[in-house]
Amino acid sequence: MLDHLMARETPDICNNYLRNGPDAVSAPDSEFLAHLDKVGATLFRAFGAAKRSGLPAAEPEDQDWSLLADAFTKSGGTPAEMDAIANANQDFAGLCPAMAKLYGAALSLPGESGRHVKTALLYAIVKN
């Protein structure tokens, strides 16, 4: 979804999407709505898979977040982007690309650390 928004909307609209969700796009086109459906289906599948796994939803530890920060940096993430993400700085013009890098970095994490981080991010996405 972020890739779609970054390609078609202003940085302000994309940043607003991170804060307010789909309501940030005032006139969604059919492609946006199709992406929105995919996001919803993916979230339902992720929650279903998590529930069926029987594994407890463990909170990420400091070392898990450190691995994410390392993966983020290796994918080209900068300290300024990390600061903007950590502070939810909606005025940071590159917030959407930074979040896309963060999600990519999270998806690249294997094992328990990856599971902990992805679970925490999934809950944060759904909560918002």
Image (cartoon, rainbow, N blue to C red):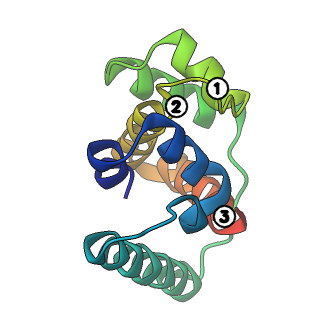
Instruction: Residue 123: give its label.
Output: 3
Q: Is residue 108 left or right of residue 87?
A: left
Residue type of the residue flagged with mark 2: Leu
* 119 w.r.t. 95: above or below: below
* x and y, in percent, of residue 122 in the image: 58, 62
Q: Residue at x 39, y 34 (%)?
A: 101
Q: Which residue is mark 1?
A: 91
Q: Residue at x 58, y 85 (%)?
A: 51
* x and y, in percent, of residue 15 in the image: 55, 41
* 102 w.r.t. 30: above or below: above
In the structure shown, which secondary structural element does the residue marked by tag 2 occupy? Answer: helix
Residue type of the residue flagged with mark 3: Tyr
Q: Do the CB atoms of the residues marked 1 and 3 lie less than 8 Å apart? A: no
* x and y, in percent, of residue 78 in the image: 46, 13
Q: Which residue is mark 2?
A: 95
Q: Residue at x 40, y 41 (%)?
A: 100
* x and y, in percent, of residue 2 in the image: 39, 50
Q: Quadrant of residue 31?
A: bottom left
* 86 w.r.t. 58: above or below: above
Quadrant position of the N terminus in the picture: bottom left
